């Protein structure tokens, strides 16, 4: 059954799907078909524009959302796109994929057989580091230290930089723990979730040819729920889309659920400044509620 873009999409959704040259910001409230725009745009790029699936990256925030996005695209195209190289996933999973291919180039002792630790493992490691440093976990609560380290990484702040501007006792303590924590990760060939993105950006900084490879590879970068990006996710999108400049972001400028993880809703409001000449499209029809 042929794809019917005009029949399946309202005029604003269709405009967002067909806008395939340059940066495009789609502002959309809940129930207005944000994910529909992303999935149909992926299908449109492949079916109508002849873009190879391996040259498209579509990013979202949860594994569930990524799985739903892939399923919808598979239904639209009628094939198993994963075998054709389409990159659909969360920021963390896609960065993990890049690191499996490239991490050894960082020269930090990591191999592509690295293990990703979860939040419980992370807290245990911080507790272990506190013990090594003879720091009382009752005074320096491990979970609070974990949160501060995560916040630093999300803002692309390394241990040395944190030391430079840490003034309070907890900031100084965090900087000290952060250094040894990171050292223990490297020694164990371990990455935490923040490292997955932060190390890709570091890789791009230290190996420009790697950044050029991926920026050249991805002719189109599409991001769902853009209002929830933090600084390092924002930087990643900018780096990956700089070669071709075809970046589509979809989000609700009135809603951000990940502020506690460093999400900065101001970034979506600054999109036109960051990407001059961007097309802005508003989806104002709500399909869930009147």
Image: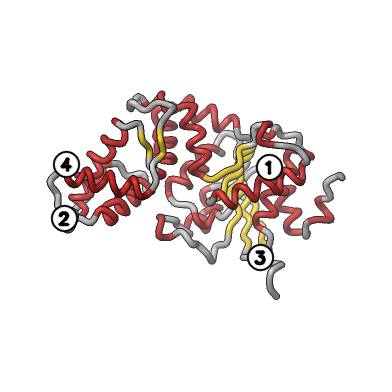
Give me the C-alpha separation between circle 4 and circle 3: 51 Å
Residue ID at (61%, 54%): 250
Q: Position of residue 99 (x, y in %)?
A: 46, 32
Q: Are marks 4 and 2 in contact (CB under 8 Å)?
A: no
Residue ID at (48%, 36%): 96
Of labels 3 and 1, earlier in sequence is 1
Q: Split into 4 quadrants, where in the image is the C terminus?
A: bottom right
Give me the C-alpha separation between circle 4 and circle 1: 54 Å
Of labels 4 and 2, earlier in sequence is 4
Question: Mark 1, residues whose alpha carbon is within 10 Å: few (<14), some, or many (≥20)?
Answer: some
User: Label 3 belongs to which residue?
Assistant: 31
Report the side of 153 relative to 256 (left or right): left
Give me the C-alpha separation between circle 4 and circle 2: 18 Å
User: Label 4 belongs to which residue?
Assistant: 132
User: Label 2 belongs to which residue?
Assistant: 169
User: Label 1 belongs to which residue?
Assistant: 21
Q: Is residue 163 visible?
A: no
Q: Position of residue 56 (x, y in %)?
A: 64, 37
From the image, state whether disc 4 or disc 2 is nearer to you. Answer: 4
Residue sitting nearer the eye, 108 or 237: 108
When the figure is inspected, residue 251 is found, relative to residue 200, above or below; the finding is below
> Element type at marker 3?
loop
Of labels 1 and 2, earlier in sequence is 1
């Amino acid at each position: 059954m042929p794809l019917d873009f005009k029949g399946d999409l309202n005029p604003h959704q269709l405009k967002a799907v067909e806008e395939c040259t340059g940066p495009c910001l789609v502002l959309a409230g809940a129930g207005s078909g944000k994910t529909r725009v992303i999935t149909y745009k992926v299908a449109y790029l492949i079916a109508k524009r002849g873009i190879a699936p391996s040259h498209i990256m579509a990013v979202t925030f949860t594994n569930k959302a990524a799985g739903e996005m892939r399923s919808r695209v598979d239904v639209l195209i009628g094939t198993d796109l994963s075998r054709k190289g389409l990159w659909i996933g969360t920021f963390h999973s896609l960065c993990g994929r890049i690191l499996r291919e490239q991490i050894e180039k960082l020269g930090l002792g990591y191999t592509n057989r690295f293990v990703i630790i979860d939040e419980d493992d992370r807290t245990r490691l911080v507790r272990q580091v506190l013990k090594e440093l003879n720091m009382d976990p009752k005074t320096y609560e491990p979970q609070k230290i974990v949160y501060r380290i995560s916040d630093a990484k999300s803002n692309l702040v390394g241990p040395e930089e944190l030391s430079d501007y840490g003034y309070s006792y907890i900031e100084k303590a965090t900087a000290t723990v952060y250094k040894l924590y990171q050292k223990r990760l490297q020694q164990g060939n371990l990455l935490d979730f923040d490292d997955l993105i932060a190390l890709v950006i570091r890789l791009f900084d230290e190996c420009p040819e790697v950044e050029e490879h991926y920026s050249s590879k991805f002719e189109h970068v599409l991001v769902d729920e853009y209002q929830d990006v933090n600084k390092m996710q924002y930087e990643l999108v900018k780096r990956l889309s700089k070669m071709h400049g075809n970046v589509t972001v979809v989000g609700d400028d009135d809603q951000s659920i990940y502020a506690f993880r460093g999400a900065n809703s101001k970034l979506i409001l600054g999109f036109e400044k960051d990407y001059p000449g961007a097309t802005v499209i508003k989806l104002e029809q709500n399909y869930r509620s009147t």
